[in-house]
Amino acid sequence: MKYVVMIQARCGSTRLPNKVLKPLCGKPALQRMIERVQRSSLVDEVMVITSINKENLPILALCADLGVRCGVGAEDDVLDRYYQTAKLLKPEYVIRLTADCPCFDAELLDLALSQMEPDADYMGMITESFADGLDLEIMKYAALEKSWKEAVHSFEREHVTQYIKRHPEIFRLQNFESPIGFFGNHRWTVDEPEDFELVTKVYEHFEIGEKNDSFGYRDILDFLNQNPEIMALNSKYARNEGLAKSIREDHLVQPE
């Protein structure tokens, strides 16, 4: 197995509770995300990664209905959750996505996979030239395993790829740059109520208005550029607020 996608999902969000199960034009947001990722022509499997907390049982039930395998692990040590699941499959590459990105475009994933250089240990949107909510990270299984063994900061255990990204002297990093120019000022992720309002308007426009369920990132960009009042709905929120909070609260931990 070469490429395995692992979508990180949980129900316990404090800013927008149960966000991954909120309906988007008749389907849970997580299902929308899964279906959009499954359009990739290169990945071998799409999985969901969640924690052992009982509040996440609805995620397991949804994945069972969709025929999607799940990995289940520690609540706070997400790096361990990824590694323990990947260890069972031992793919050449693990692709990390998050369930709060229901505007994800598999075209970008396939483009990134086709551009990733053989000696790169990690590829991601390092320069953040894409909209927040199109995020993808590709890492070699060996890099994930080394991170799992060596990462000792709590934010590195919670945010899976931080150890890799902060050690370019150990890992070879490759940037994935937007092929259409910078649009990193857009926010298409779902962390806040205003985020969900924006994404809902996107889905309503394409799914209901245009009867188009295969819309891509270029379509969304054009729609929002033509409707700046919708784009402004969540403009007050900063990118990577969750990571910044984790770094502020960082402490040393002992890996398993």
Image (cartoon, grey):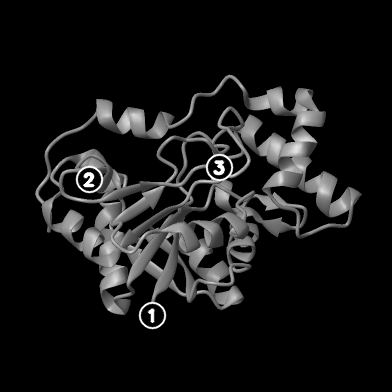
User: Rounded to the nearest whole Å, what is the CA distance between mark 3 and mark 1?
Assistant: 28 Å
Earlier residue among tags 1 and 2: 1
Earlier residue among tags 3 and 2: 2
Helix, strand or loop under label 1: loop
Which mark is nearer the camera, 3 or 1? Answer: 3
Give the residue drawn at x 57%, y 46%. Answer: 19
Give the residue drawn at x 55%, y 39%. Answer: 130
Within-10-Å neighbours for mark 2: few <14, some 14–19, many 20+: many
How far across and how far down the image is residue 188, in percent? 62, 38
Amino acid type at circle 3 is Ser
Q: Quadrant of the N terminus?
A: bottom left
- The answer to whether 220 appears left or right of 11 in the picture is right
Helix, strand or loop under label 3: loop
Give the residue drawn at x 62%, y 22%. Answer: 235
Specify the label residue 163 is tagged with: 2
How far across and how far down the image is residue 152, in percent? 13, 45
The residue beneath circle 3 is 178
Judged from this view, the residue extending furthest toward the left is 254
User: Rounded to the nearest whole Å, what is the CA distance between mark 1 and mark 2?
Assistant: 25 Å
The residue beneath circle 1 is 1
Nearest the eye: 214 or 246: 214
